[in-house]
Image (cartoon, rainbow, N blue to C red):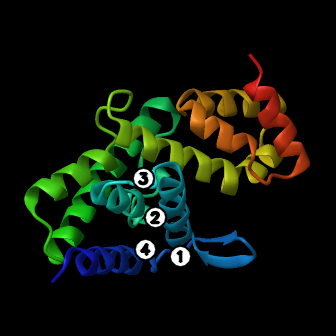
Amino acid sequence: MGDDERLRRALAAIDEANAGDPNRIEVRGASRPKEVAHAELVSEWVERLRPNASEALRLAARAHHVQRWTIPRSDHPEGRLGYHRWRTALQRFHAEKAGEILAGVGYDAATIERVQNLVQKRDLGRDPEVQALEDALCLVFLETQLRELAERLDEVRLLDVLRKTLAKMSPAAIECAGALALAPAARACLQRAMEP
């Protein structure tokens, strides 16, 4: 099997694993399983931000939240500590699941380990590919969840969330965020969060 065929099979297997997501999201006028839509959007952003993305980064973009719904937030205690435990458990789970899928289509141990490190955001701040994945995740968050968040949170809390999100992003990704097609209220709040 050639490299292109193996990559195609891996992406299809990840999409198939995510197709069972009972949560749905509307993206570009179509209702789809949430994690399928998110994985595709993250993949698109990675390709846009890094047109020569490595195969490992492309795989990590697609597998970053594979079967996320199987570990709900409610399984962990409320509060910041519970949230961080949940996030850590998710990252380990996604890395393990990605490893299983990639091994099943014939990837070598080194590639699998690299994808797992990317999915777990190891060396964020030092590894440009981890930063590219983080940028893509933040852009998808803004693109798909900002409107709902703006309806749910007061302005002070929303600005805090947006500033924390922007702080994780590279200058190139922040520039992309400024060009997103957002509802007017969400765009105005994002612009305020971008002010020094």
- At mark 4, the secondary structure is helix
| Image vertical order of residue 5 relative to residue 53, above or below | below
Q: Nearer the viewer, residue 46 or 32?
A: 46
Name the mark nearer the viewer: 4 or 1.
4
Q: Residue furthest left?
A: 109
Q: Is residue 85 visible?
A: no
Query: Residue tagged by mark 3?
Result: 75
**Residue at the image position 55 percent from the left and 34 percent from the top:** 169
Q: If the image is split into quadrants, where does the N terminus sit? A: bottom left
- At mark 1, the secondary structure is loop
Disc number placed over residue 35 in the picture, else none: none
Give the Cα distance between marks 2 and 1: 8 Å
Name the mark nearer the viewer: 2 or 3.
2
Q: Give amino acid for label 3.
A: Asp
Q: Quick check: 2 left or right of 176? A: left
Q: Give amino acid for label 2.
A: Trp
Q: Residues within 10 Å of mark 2 (few under 14, many from 20)?
A: some
Q: Residues within 10 Å of mark 4 (few under 14, many from 20)?
A: many
Q: Quick check: 84 left or right of 25? A: left
Q: Residue furthest front?
A: 52
Query: Residue tagged by mark 1?
Result: 22
Give the Cα distance between marks 2 and 4: 9 Å
- First in sequence, mark 3 or 1: give its number: 1
Q: Position of residue 96 (x, y in %)?
A: 22, 58
Marks 2/1 in contact by CB < 8 Å: the verdict is yes
Query: Residue tagged by mark 2?
Result: 69
Disc number placed over residue 18 in the picture, else none: 4
Marks 4/1 in contact by CB < 8 Å: the verdict is no
